Amino acid sequence: MEEPIQQPILGPVMLVDLDAIGQQQSPRASLD
């Protein structure tokens, strides 16, 4: 039961990490 519960949690977490990294590396991309 823990496996299916962790999957949806890791999904949004990874997206947030990519967003934070993208903003730091390319702040202009966020405006676009």
Image (spheres, rainbow, N blue to C red):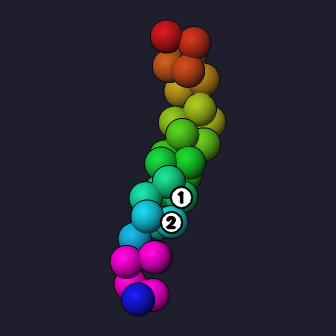
**Above or below — where is 31 with respect to 16?**
above
Which residue does the image show at 55% across and 52% down from the upper left? 17
Q: Secondary structure at mark 1?
A: helix
Between residue 2 and residue 17, name the one nearer to us.
2
Q: Secondary structure at mark 2?
A: helix
| Res 23 quadrant in image | top right
Main secondary-structure element of the magenta-colored stretch: helix
Q: Nearer the viewer, mark 1 or mark 2?
A: 2
Q: Is residue 23 left or right of residue 12?
A: right
Q: Position of residue 19 (x, y in %)?
A: 54, 40
Extent of the magenta region: 2-6
Which residue was labeled with disc 1? 13
Which residue does the image show at 47% across and 48% down from the upper left? 15
Is residue 21 visible from the viewing direction of this image?
Answer: no
Between residue 24 and residue 2, name the one nearer to us.
2
User: Are circles 1 and 2 on residues that touch, CB within 8 Å?
Assistant: yes
Callout 2 amino acid? Ile
Which residue was labeled with disc 2? 9
**Above or below — where is 30 with respect to 12?**
above
